[in-house]
Image (cartoon, rainbow, N blue to C red):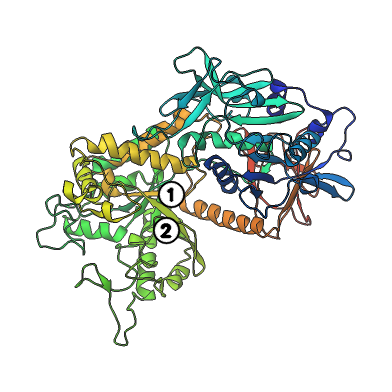
Amino acid sequence: MAQVALRWRNAAAGLTTVGLLAVGLGAPGASAATAPRIDLKVLVVDNGDSPVAAIAAELKNTGIPYTTVNLNDSSRPTVDAAFLSDTVSGTPRAKYQGVVLPNEAPFGSGSAEQTALETYEKTYGIPQLDAYTWAHPEVGLDYTSEGGWTGSLDGRAAAVTTAGTSGPFGYLDGPLTFEDNSSSVSESYGYVAKPRTGFTSYVDTAVPGGEGRGSLVGEYAHDGRRELVVTFAYNQYQQQFRVLARGMVEWLTQGVHLGQSRSYFSVHVDDVFAPDARWDAARNCTPGDIDCVGGGAEGTPIRMTAADAQYAAQWEQSTGFTLDMVFNAGSGEEWKSENGGTDAPATQLLADKAKYRWVNHTYTHQFLGCVQDTTTVPWSCAKNADGSTRYMSRSDISAEIRNNYNWAVSKGLSTDRTELVTGEHSGLRTLPQQPDDNPNLAGALADNGVKWTGSDNSREPQQRAVGAALTVPRYPMNVYYNAGTAAEMADEYNWIYTSRADGGSGVCEDNPSSTCLPAPLDTATGYVSYIVPLEARTALGHALGNDPRPHYAHQSNLAEDRILYPVLDKVLAGYKALYADNAPLENPRQSAIGTELKRRAAWQTAVSNGSVTAYRIGTTVTVKAPSGTQIPVTAPEGTRKQLVLGTAVFGTPYAGRRSAWTTPEVLQSALTLKLPA
């Protein structure tokens, strides 16, 4: 990808020899001894607007160190030559490899700070990203009055240009549509403008009501500097930013940076082999659940059939996507004994066992926390005679884990002993009733070799320790465990998300973080027309945000109307329509996800503590971090890792780059990479 990086610059303008040295491409007669040191850190000049916050969030999420200068802070440092550069061991040092600004000249054109910054960029070949600015000649664009347009971009289609595809946005494949989630709100305002000399458009759109196309993202090369000019407003959660963020960062860092970013999507299907209770539309609760009061018989439980199991295997085959089957073997055995001693869906699932990943969900899905007192609604924790909380014992928890794992081994399932998801994430603290973990849980996990236990991301989004194990936060999908049909799903959704005046529970009115539906959904069509697009957009947003956390639904959602598949199909199709084959959607299992989150936390701690030193001189990258710290690095194709003797190919390919978590070799005090010349 060094060749690609060079094409970006050639397409825009020629570079000075200093610029070539700074990016490590070399020049006639140049050597590492004459090249400056460029620290692998980004400078972010923040004015408080959402586009700068979005870029900063992307840097942090990727794992790229950055320093922020807050323009609204009267005690902020002065941006001058000493702030930007110095000399280390006789070698000139640029302290930042890229600069993010809220616009092209936030300090004021011609001011001392602006001049110092521009001089720094010229001297060391440092790129500047203008997070959001308007179209005018000073950024290489015509005014919008000269054949362009200004206004809301909601719902409009944009495209990556040929220059963008061969440059920083080569991981994108199809058109990009700006979000339009509400007809009553303008979500993304922008300037569509024609490029001038020195400007190369990377992302453009048809000029509304005009002729030709105008730029939305492009590079302006002028006066020995390069700027990435963005002329639409955005925040870190909007899909158009998430899709383009990778390319913006790669342009800013010239394809060499700490951290890595990939797209992830994994789906856990809980309660496999067990039946799930059914929503009662008349009583607006789920009979059999301890919080459903008022009498009345339980509905027919929801459970996969053999045909549902066959469909699951066929769906996996057609999509190339692997589901994680989170199973309760004992619940299945109980079902079989109560239904004539045969279990056709379990037989079919086991026949196709090699097509899935299998995760221990405990033997009979018991609640592993405090002993529940169901005489109250909501339930409460039972107490011992001395007033202390009564908990499930370590031996009983351990038996639930062990029996399920042993059953899996006897059936030849590909179960990883280190992975566990407890029923309802029980055993972990459950507010408000159980504010602490069951003190017996950590020991039971250790007894069974469990290193990764699932948790509910809506309650605990951060990974944490449970004894020697770590949690793996999972996203709950709005595809409910107690719904087997689209009508049931829409009815329960209406109960939760409509006001009391519209016949709902009013929960959405009482919760400040929730929004009520303007009117109840049609139970015949509401699931497909409203819930599926909304849930798919949410899940796809996680995937686009370098977020490896798995999503979870239930076996009931693969039964009857098979309501989970429309959501999954929409996520997979949406991703495929946007991304090229060089940026596949990764589908890791729970242990790999837990490892990724653990590494990220350790890396962020090292960066926050200032204990990471990283720089490049010419074509050599050097990184020093605390001993044992896994270091994430992204670099061009052709990069090699320095060994004690010789070199080896670095990393694995993704989105046109190579990246990996790595460490120095034995007997080495620093990680050393050799970039392609």
> Which amino acid lies under the numbered mark 2 shown in the image of this protein?
Gly
For the residue carrying disc 1, how many other residues have a C-alpha within 10 Å: few (<14), some (14-19), or many (20+)? many
Looking at the rendered structure, which numbered label has been put on residue 103? none
Relative placement, left or right, of 217 versus 18 is: left
Would you identify the image quadrant in which residue 218 lies? top right
State which tag comes first along the sequence, 2 or 1: 2
Which corner quadrant holds the C terminus?
Answer: top right
For the residue carrying disc 2, how many other residues have a C-alpha within 10 Å: few (<14), some (14-19), or many (20+)? many
Residue bearing mark 1: 550
In depth, the one of 364 and 529 nearer the eye is: 529
Q: Is residue 669 visible?
A: yes
Q: Position of residue 8 (x, y in %)?
A: 68, 26
Relative placement, left or right, of 85 versus 397 is: right
> Which amino acid lies under the numbered mark 1 shown in the image of this protein?
Pro
Q: Outermost residue, bottom direction?
A: 386
Instruction: Reply above or below: 525 against 478.
Output: above
Name the residue rendered at 43%, 25% in the picture: 156
Relative placement, left or right, of 506 versus 624 is: left
Where disc 1 sits, the SS reads loop
Name the residue rendered at 60%, 39% in the picture: 102
Instruction: Reply above or below: 338 against 66.
Output: below
- Mark 2 in CB contact with mark 1 (< 8 angstroms): yes
Q: Is residue 175 visible?
A: no
Instruction: Reply above or below: 443 against 559.
Output: below
Would you identify the image quadrant in which residue 51 lies? top right
In depth, the one of 176 and 223 nearer the eye is: 223
Q: Position of residue 343 (x, y in %)?
A: 23, 51
Where disc 2 sits, the SS reads strand
Residue bearing mark 2: 454
